[in-house]
Image (cartoon, rainbow, N blue to C red):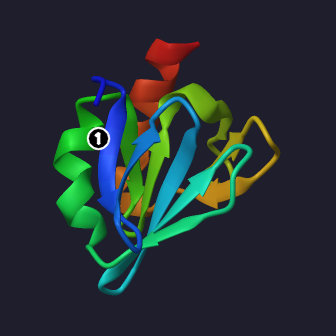
Amino acid sequence: MHNDDLQINYRSNIFISLKELVFLEGDGNYTNFIFRNQPKYISARTLKYFADDLTQKGFIRIHRSILVNKKFIATTNIIESSVILIDGTKLTISRRRLKEVFQCSSNMF
């Protein structure tokens, strides 16, 4: 396991590359892992379980249920309170996290 890998339980223990992980979406007691060129994985762990580790590895929490890899953010839209990912996906930023996300994005560009 490398520093840019994450171990998740998906029918068995697997290691995923954080370089390909675009974002995570919490869905109750499950977390969906969305990748650039792979099918999504589902873990029977909450988003909070992964959040502390991944925020130290280049991810940012933009919503209670969404954790995004900063490398895949193309732009942030202040007017619509959203981020646009490099693949065109538009994700809403919660009001509570707006300031943190915009400060982070201004440091990125």
Residue closest to the far front: 12
Q: What percent of the width, then of the height, locates residue 95?
A: 42, 61
> What residue is drawn where x is 32% and y is 58%?
8
> What residue is drawn where x is 69% and y is 52%?
38
Q: Amino acid at mark 1?
A: Leu
Q: What percent of the width, then of the height, locates residue 5?
A: 36, 34
For residue 100, side relative to residue 87 (left or right): left
> What residue is drawn where x is 29% and y is 41%?
54
Say if 14 sits above or below 101 in the image.
below
For residue 70, side relative to residue 26 (left or right): right
User: 101 and 23: which one is in front?
Assistant: 23
For residue 13, side relative to residue 101 (left or right): left
Say if 103 sits above or below 6 in the image.
above
> What residue is drawn where x is 51% and y is 16%?
108
Residue at the spot of label 1: 54
User: 91 and 15: which one is in front?
Assistant: 15
Say if 39 sits above or below 31 in the image.
above
Q: Is residue 100 visible?
A: no
Name the image quarter holding the C terminus.
top right
Q: What percent of the width, then of the height, locates residue 78?
A: 62, 43
- Quadrant of the rendered image containing residue 83: top right
Q: What percent of the width, then of the height, locates residue 72?
A: 62, 33
